[in-house]
Amino acid sequence: MRKKKSAEFLTEVELEFMSHLWALGRGSVRDLLAKLAPDRALAYTSAATIMRILEEKGFVKSTKQGKTFIYTPLVEKNAYQSRSLRDLSAKLFDGTPATLVARLVDDEGLSVEALEEIRAMVDRKLKDDAE
């Protein structure tokens, strides 16, 4: 018996395709193939299968225009990022977002500019929540 595909999260290749589709807004399999690195050499049929799976999982919808299917994201990139980070925080950082951020800050070797940008974001969020 085949295991049911997880509809909540994307595989690496699915995320690659979704990232291009989010950037395009909508597109055909050929449009997405054109966005892949030239050395990727992925067959049209493989790309079409990936898009069909994304549709089955509820991440995209397709509409037929002539002989071509045009795909549109059903899940916004920001919503998927939030869902993925919550899952990562829960699974790897004991549900403690501060631990996740601490690991990022400690391990990434962030520049002073990046750290100041993070501080500014936190300060803005604290200010907005206080109002």
Image (spheres, grey):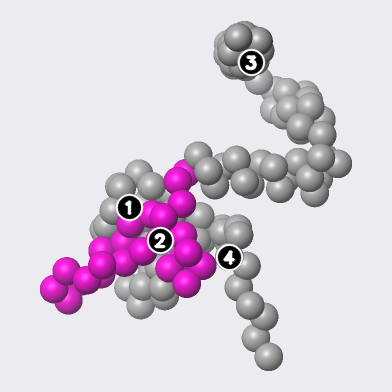
Q: Which residue is mark 1?
A: 35
Badge 2 or badge 1: first in the primary sequence: 1
Q: Nearer the viewer, mark 3 or mark 4?
A: 3
Report, in whole angstroms, how far the alpha carbon at label 3 lies from the one at label 1. 39 Å
In the image, residue 2 above or below residue 29? below
Q: Residue furthest left?
A: 66
Q: Position of residue 24 (x, y in %)?
A: 30, 47
Q: In the figure, is residue 112 to the left or right of 26?
A: right
Q: Which residue is mark 3?
A: 129
Badge 2 or badge 3: first in the primary sequence: 2
Q: Please tell me in which quadrant of the rendered image residue 90 appears.
A: top right
Structural crowding at the residue carrying mark 4, measured as other residues with C-alpha within 10 Å and reported as few (<14), some (14–19) or many (≥20): few
* Residue 119 can be seen, yes or no: no
Q: Which residues are magenta?
A: 53-77
Structural crowding at the residue carrying mark 1, measured as other residues with C-alpha within 10 Å and reported as few (<14), some (14–19) or many (≥20): some
Q: In the figure, is residue 45 to the left or right of 102?
A: left
Q: Nearer the viewer, mark 2 or mark 1?
A: 2
Badge 3 or badge 1: first in the primary sequence: 1
Q: Position of residue 85 (x, y in %)?
A: 66, 41
In the image, residue 103 above or below residue 59? above
Badge 4 or badge 2: first in the primary sequence: 4
**The label number, if any, that marks residue 60 in the structure image:** 2
* Residue 82 can be seen, yes or no: yes
Q: Which residue is mark 4?
A: 7
Q: Nearer the viewer, mark 2 or mark 3?
A: 3
Report, in whole angstroms, how far the alpha carbon at label 2 lies from the one at label 1. 17 Å
